[in-house]
Amino acid sequence: MGLYMSMTVTDQDRPSTLPQKPPAPARAASAKWVVAALILLSAIPLAAGVFRLSQLAGGAEITPANARFFAAPLPVVLHIISAGVYAVLGAFQFVPSLRRRRNGWHRIAGRILIPSGLIVALSGLWMTLFYPWPAGDGVILYGLRLFFGSAMLLAILLGSAAIRQRDFVRHGHWMLRGYAIGMGAGTQVLTGMVASIVADPPTELSRALLMGAGWVINLAVAEWIIRRAGSR
């Protein structure tokens, strides 16, 4: 995501109050944990997406829960495939060694991630606007999906504009925000698990609040990372 910019400072010129970077092995180990956590977070939504694709490909029985997908399969197919690429490939953008300019990984991955993220946002907005509402949805959740889908689209577009202006820091910030929103489905699994313990079955209002909480939590973490990086 291009979040951290490198700066060459000699030991002689380095202020005594400047925070020291952790050793390279520690940073590499930390990056591995981040990648593993992000892939694990997306595992259940991706598994659900694969199951949905198998239903569409195998001609499963049409029910009220899946009829909208059979009626217009292209948006959901694009959404699932692009979300899988975006979630998994995007996780590796948090590895510092892969973000170095000498390594072409970051640029090549970005050329895949930006279109994938745009497809995720646009297909999600299309499904929100034109698919019939599933059972349990309501006006609040409808509004939240439109808001966060639009926010993800805007973040990726702003990140793309920033990189064209060679503003690497702002590019990283906006791409991180877009990725955080895109990973909302994974966090929503966790908030849903908490809800099933506290109040089951969920109401229309509680479902909307829990779904919204998934996006808000991810954005809060993203903003914390951005502020923490800026303070260094």
Image: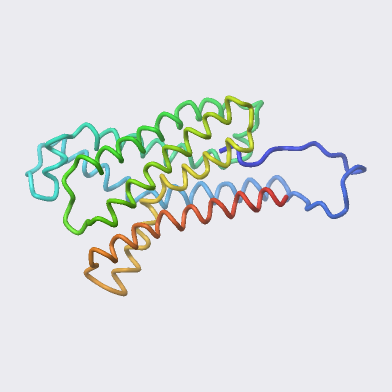
Kindly identify the residue that appears in the image at 59 percent across and 51 percent down. Answer: 225
Total residue callouts: 0
Instruction: Name the residue furthest bottom.
Output: 198
- For residue 224, what is the image quadrant? bottom right
Image quadrant containing the N terminus: top right
Q: Position of residue 17 (x, y in %)?
A: 84, 55
Q: Position of residue 176 (x, y in %)?
A: 52, 43
Q: Position of residue 107 (x, y in %)?
A: 55, 26
Asked if residue 91 lies left or right of residue 4, the reply is left
Asked if residue 183 lies left or right of residue 27, the reply is left
Q: Nearer the viewer, residue 144 or 196?
A: 144
Kindly identify the residue that appears in the image at 21 percent across and 69 percent down. Answer: 201
Way the structure is coloured: rainbow
- Residue 184 sits above or below residue 77 on the image: below
Kindly identify the residue that appears in the image at 37 percent across and 57 percent down. Answer: 212
- For residue 204, what is the image quadrant? bottom left
Asked if residue 70 lies left or right of residue 201, the reply is left
Q: Nearer the viewer, residue 29 or 150?
A: 150
